[in-house]
């Protein structure tokens, strides 16, 4: 159970737990024509948040390719070999989109900085696409740019445009950047994104996304969360963190700690570890502990601290 305990006798100023930058990527390695409308995973992970599956809504019932998120049956309106957007007749349909959600764990807040992704279309696939989120009920496109890719552009208002029908459809086009600014900061519940596409040349045209890279910052909160536990718990000179626990490790910091116990709420002790009156930061590996609520007990001299901890596994 207790695979590894690491003691660091260090003086630590500001534990570095209040904010953690992250960068994760969806690569869709297991998507194929048999997997249906939901990406089977695995999904990326980051401390303090849970990233859900991509799903396809209002389009074909099966992927049109493997190794990327690709579907057909998008709203049509583009003309074959015509690159004049003014001649297109299609429009975004609120019923046709790709969707994914980021859930923020209790005790954390999320600042989402950017979403970048690559796109590909078949020869008759959509020429326009955009990204929206639930924070304004999917009413407005999020701010976007295309970097240095001259094969793509942005037209009003924050709509991506595949510039030339003659561009090869056998390669991804990179440089699709979503930059929501501060509008998606301080998220403490969840945020859902929709990727819309339209102006296909025919219903059989496909639109795919891949290499979806998400960057942001996760902050731990000091207030008691809905589970009645704190992210960083302190009493006297003893600190316990993080809480909830989403990774392999749990940390105890104090002076002359001589016993650490983890138990379930039936009273069964899962492990008991005597660190021999060590001081500093003790890292406890709990990688084998399943999701659920537990009780951690720490003995420091004659003082005993008991607190609830929550283990949240993503699988």
Image (spheres, rainbow, N blue to C red):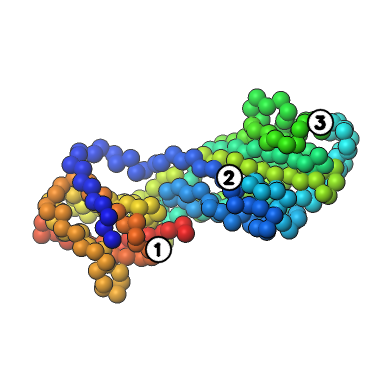
**In front: mark 2 or mark 1?**
2
Disc with the residue nearer the chain's start (3 vs 2): 2
Residues tagged 3 and 2 counted as in contact (Cβ below 8 A): no
Residue 19 screen position, x and y as percent: 39, 41
Q: Tell which of 62 and 174 is nearer to you.
A: 62
Question: Is 271 left, or right, of 212 in this rendering?
Answer: left
| Residue designated by label 2 | 27
Which comes before the other along the chain, label 1 or label 3? 3
Crowding near pointer 3: few (<14 within 10 Å), some, many (20+)?
few
Q: Quadrant of the N terminus?
A: bottom left
Residue under numbered circle 1? 291
| Residue 293 picture location, percent across and down | 36, 65
Q: Quickly name the residue at label 3.
A: 166
Relative placement, left or right, of 219 versus 52 is: left
Residue closer to the observer: 151 or 157: 151
* Residue 35 % position (x, y): 65, 58
């Amino acid at each position: 159970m207790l695979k590894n305990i690491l003691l660091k006798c260090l003086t630590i100023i500001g534990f570095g737990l209040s904010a953690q930058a992250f960068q994760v990527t969806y690569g869709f390695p297991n998507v194929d024509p048999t997997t249906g409308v939901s990406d089977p995973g695995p999904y990326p992970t980051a401390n303090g948040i849970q990233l859900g599956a991509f799903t396809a809504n209002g389009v074909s019932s099966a992927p049109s390719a493997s190794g990327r998120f690709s579907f057909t049956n998008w709203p049509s309106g583009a003309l074959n070999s015509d690159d004049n957007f003014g001649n297109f007749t299609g429009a975004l349909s609120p019923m046709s989109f790709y969707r994914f959600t980021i859930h923020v764990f209790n005790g954390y807040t999320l600042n989402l900085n950017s979403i970048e992704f690559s796109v590909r279309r078949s020869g008759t696939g959509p020429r326009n696409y955009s990204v929206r989120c639930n924070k304004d009920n999917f009413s407005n496109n999020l701010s976007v740019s295309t970097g240095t890719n001259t094969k793509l552009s942005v037209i009003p208002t924050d709509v991506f445009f595949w510039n030339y029908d003659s561009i090869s459809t056998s390669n991804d086009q990179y440089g699709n950047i979503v930059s929501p600014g501060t509008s998606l900061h301080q998220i403490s519940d969840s945020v859902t994104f929709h990727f819309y596409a339209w102006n296909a040349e025919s219903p059989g045209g496909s639109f795919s996304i891949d290499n979806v890279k998400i960057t942001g910052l996760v902050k731990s909160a000091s207030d008691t969360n809905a589970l009645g536990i704190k992210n960083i718990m302190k009493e006297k000179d003893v600190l316990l963190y993080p809480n909830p626990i989403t990774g392999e490790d749990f940390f105890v910091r104090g002076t002359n700690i001589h016993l650490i116990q983890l138990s379930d709420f039936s009273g069964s002790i899962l492990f008991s570890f005597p660190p021999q009156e060590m001081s500093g930061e003790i890292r406890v590996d709990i990688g084998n502990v399943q999701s659920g609520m537990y009780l951690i007990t720490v003995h420091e001299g004659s003082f005993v601290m008991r607190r609830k901890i929550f283990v949240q596994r993503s699988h």
